Amino acid sequence: MVEALGSPAVDDRAIGVFDSGFGGLTVARALIDLLPGEDLVYFGDTARYPYGPRPLDEVREFAREITSVLVGRHDVKMVVAACNTAAAAALELLRFEHDLPVVGVIDPGVRAALAVTDNRRVGVIGTAGTMASGAYERSVASHRANVVLTCCACPGFVELVERGETTSPAARALVEERLAPLRQAQIDTLLLGCTHYPFLARIIADMMGREVVLVSSADETAFEVRSILKETGLFRRTGGKGAHRFISSGDVRRFRELGSRLLGPELDDVEGWTWD
Ligand code: DGL
């Protein structure tokens, strides 16, 4: 922390962001757009994705390991768990274990969905792990929101995105099959409770029809990060564009190719990471 007497507090360290793979790039995009002056370190655990089908205990350990890398090696000032499955498994523990702000994506997503729904019937889709954790029901309950929440696990969606297959006929067929139960639920809002899913938004929107609004947690998470930076005085010194570093535990060349397609030109270099 750099704090000169009489001037506002500033903190030039980066914001750490992580996900099982490419999904958290939806949150990274929102952060870069909202906070262009902040440095960012993104960790995609592509060697160990998908997290969704794994036991939550295992995902919790992965989240702890990645957070240790971000804090210990990259000295980040804040961690964004840009993965619903990891947030469902580990958010409270990470907050307990680290003396810095740890932001998840579940509460921000719920806030965004509650702000949108008119008929108070909201659907949420996510990985098997996130849906089984009950994290969305708990978050909605904590808002004392009078809404009917219909939860639906969508196994296979993350794999589609990780393969870069976001518009193929096979992707459409799987999306149609998985979303069928939601089409009976008369929802007017569908919360994408997995950070990979915005990359499938076009076909999900097609399936759900025009009367259903899709909501992702990315923007609301970025707003929450900005509020925390403001409250804690952790903003980076103003002026100049932030630097963005990307790390993948899997194939770095592939991460760069697909990642730059999904995120944009900021993802022009990827560093490797190997788990022992
Ligand atoms: N983006 C992760 C999430 O939000 C995907 C988890 C996975 O790898 O299955 O849940």
Image (tube, helix red, strand yellow):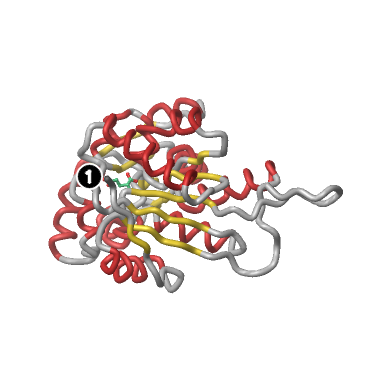
Residue 202 place in picture, x, y as percent: 31, 62
Closer to the camera in the image, 128 or 47: 47
- Give the quadrant of residue 91: top left
Q: Is residue 79 above or below residue 241?
A: above
Q: How many marks?
A: 1
Look at 33% across and 68% down and name the residue there.
Answer: 256
206 with respect to 95 (left or right): left
Residue 123: in sight, yes or no? no
Residue 69 place in picture, x, y as percent: 42, 46
Look at 62% across and 43% down and name the residue there.
Answer: 228
Q: Quadrant of the C terminus?
A: top left
Q: Is residue 251 above or below residue 44?
A: below
Q: Secondary structure at mark 1?
A: loop
Closer to the camera in the image, 66 or 151: 66
Residue 253: in sight, yes or no? yes
Question: For mark 1, does the 10 Å Cα neighbourhood hold few (<14), some (14 to 19), or many (20 or more) residues?
Answer: many
Residue 157 place in picture, x, y as percent: 22, 51
Residue identified by numbered label 1: 154
| Amino acid type shown at disc 1 | Cys
222 with respect to 201 (left or right): right
Look at 29% across and 34% down and name the residue there.
Answer: 131
- Give the quadrant of residue 239: bottom right
37 with respect to 221 (left or right): right
